[in-house]
């Protein structure tokens, strides 16, 4: 008989929320713990030690009850009842924000309907404006004018 690696579905008890990005996964347990694993080059699996987390690794920075999880291509977000910017910015995405990936955060906010994520996007845009990104400043001003006119 030939032995093969055959995937087996294992559903651990106590899982409350699951979100999957392009190549990573986050879960929230009923007891409040969060685990992440998979491709992690941008910190999206919440493991600061390696570029690939082979096994579920605990996320120990999260404070508060997890309300929602969201994941995409190279990013993840955790919304807690505290809804603080620090908790939403722990992933490396916040350290490397630019015009192209700021839209990813907007996408997460629109899909999850999370006010805290929308505020995060606004804060990141303000940060870029403060750094003197003239293209972004123009885009931000146009959006404000359209919002006031709208």
Image (tube, helix red, strand yellow):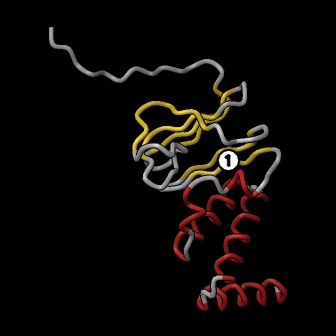
Tell me the element at label 1: strand
Residue 6 locus on image (x, y percent): 30, 21
Using the image, determine if residue 28 lies above or below residue 13.
below
Residue 135 locus on image (x, y percent): 59, 90
Using the image, determine if residue 26 lies above or below residue 130.
above
Quadrant that contains the N terminus: top left
Q: What residue would you read off at disc 1?
A: 78
Instruction: Name the residue at 56% across, 20% down.
Output: 12
Using the image, determine if residue 97 lies above or below residue 40.
below
Residue 127 locus on image (x, y percent): 68, 75
Residue lying furthest top in this view?
A: 1
Q: Quadrant of residue 148?
A: bottom right
Nearer to the camera, 81 or 43: 43
Instruction: Name the residue at 77% across, 58% down.
Output: 116
Quadrant that contains the C terminus: bottom right
Q: Categorize mark 1 by other alpha carbons within 10 Å: few (<14), some (14-19), many (20+).
A: many
Nearer to the camera, 16 or 121: 121
Instruction: Name the residue at 61% across, 91% down.
Output: 134
Residue 98 locus on image (x, y percent): 55, 74
Instruction: Name the residue at 51% across, 42% down.
Output: 47
Q: Is residue 115 found left or right of 43 in the rendered image?
A: right
Using the image, determine if residue 6 lies above or below residue 148.
above
Residue lying furthest front in this view?
A: 49
Q: Quadrant of residue 16?
A: top right
């Amino acid at each position: 008989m030939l032995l093969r690696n055959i995937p087996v579905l294992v559903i651990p008890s106590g899982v409350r929320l699951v979100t999957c990005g392009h190549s990573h996964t986050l879960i929230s347990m009923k007891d409040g713990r969060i685990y992440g694993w998979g491709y992690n080059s941008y910190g999206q699996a919440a493991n600061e030690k390696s570029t690939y987390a082979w096994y579920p690794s605990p996320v120990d920075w999260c404070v508060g009850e997890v309300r929602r999880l969201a994941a995409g291509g190279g990013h993840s977000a955790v919304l807690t009842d505290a809804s603080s910017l620090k908790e939403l910015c722990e992933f490396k995405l916040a350290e490397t924000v630019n015009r192209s990936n700021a839209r990813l955060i907007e996408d997460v906010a629109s899909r999850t309907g999370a006010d805290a994520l929308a505020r995060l996007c606004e804060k990141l845009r303000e940060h870029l404006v403060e750094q003197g990104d003239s293209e972004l400043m123009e885009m931000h001003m146009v959006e404000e004018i359209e919002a006031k006119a709208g």
